[in-house]
Amino acid sequence: MTQGAALAAVLLLWADGEALLVQTAGEAEADTVFDLASLTKPLAAAPMALELERQELLTWDQGLYDLWGQAVPEDKDDINVERLLTHAAGFPAYQPYFQALEKQPPDLRRALLRSMLMNQPLAHAPGSRALYSDLGYLTLGLLLEQGFAQGLDEALAALYARLAVEGPRYLPLDRPLAWPLERIAPCGPLPGRPIVHGQVEDENCFALGGVGAHAGLFGSARMVAKVMDALCRDESAARLFERDAATPGSGRTPGFDTPSGPDSLAGGNAPIGTVGHLGFTGCSLWWHPASNRGVVLLTNRVALGRDNERLNPLRREVHHLAWQLLGEAS
């Protein structure tokens, strides 16, 4: 199944509340744990933002000025929680903040991150367009930590407990691993990190101790599917699947992406209403909330180098066939 695109892969199809098919390839077993990269956004950050609103600790229409006061410059006055969730806050896609963060003691890094984010020039005016942005989710992560008054790893564990689901987990760098190392798929080496195994691959998240709103989750395909199943059964979570109608041209929902047409990596036959996300490390999640059916494809693409581009054609083909097997093809 990997066709040289990754060293390990797990494909899971979910329907009617259980796994319909689990297929492994390469150095993977059904319960292999992968670095889920940006799947952290829909599986952790967005549900936690919803949980804060449910607990009346935060509202999605609250702006940065309301939450942080004078520390927020004028160009960011119109950024609110919902715009951060839907990538409509105006932040550029990425900055290597880790280069500055790793020079500071760990307990000072979040304050420095907030300062850098607030001094970051915006790519466009908030609400004027959608632009996928890790920086927006770095900002969101700081707001979530403030709202919960605890680390995101602890807050997420409490949320999953409320949903009665054994979901993915963060692997904080200062704590023992949650699983044996041999159960975790490795990633490829990075500058200054010759072995990236059991530690988050994303450098900005690594500099934050392995816990972020934009990246940091680790989990198996079944764990990913169980979170999606739980969200689909939770009426309050329906908001996460609603497309952003306020931002011109947006294909985003709070936390999720939507298929982009016939050439989408979700499969050109993905049914209307499908939501999902991709992860830089080689992970894919696409789900049809109305029928609570979906496909999870986890790989460690980056184990063969960050410039390995062989996965995308495979993603498109696998997802196309998956929708046919699930009986949901458009």
Image (cartoon, rainbow, N blue to C red):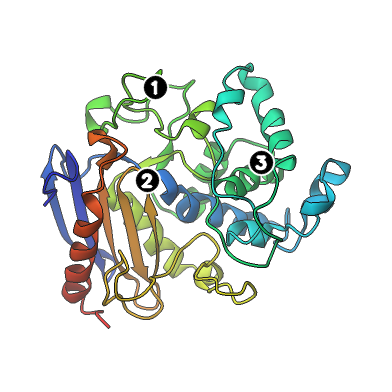
Label total for image: 3
Badge 3 element: helix
Mark 1 surroundings: few (<14), some (14-19) or many (≥20) residues within 10 A: few
In depth, the one of 103 and 121 nearer the eye is 121
Q: Residue furthest right?
A: 70
Q: Is residue 143 left or right of residue 267?
A: right
Snapshot quadrant of residue 138: top right
Badge 2 element: loop
Three-letter amino acid code at disc 2? Answer: Phe
Snapshot quadrant of residue 59: bottom right
- First reached walking from the N terminus: tag 3 or tag 1: 3
Q: Which mark is residue 142?
A: 3
Three-letter amino acid code at disc 3? Answer: Leu
Q: Where in the figure is residue 270, as x and y percent of width and height?
A: 30, 75
Q: Quadrant of the C terminus?
A: bottom left
Q: Is residue 314 left or right of residue 281?
A: left
At x 37% / y 81%, what residue is drawn?
272
Mark 3 surroundings: few (<14), some (14-19) or many (≥20) residues within 10 A: some
Q: Where in the figure is residue 41, as x and y percent of width and height?
A: 49, 51
Q: Where in the figure is residue 103, as x and y percent of width and height?
A: 60, 17
- First reached walking from the N terminus: tag 2 or tag 3: 3
Q: Which residue is mark 2?
A: 280
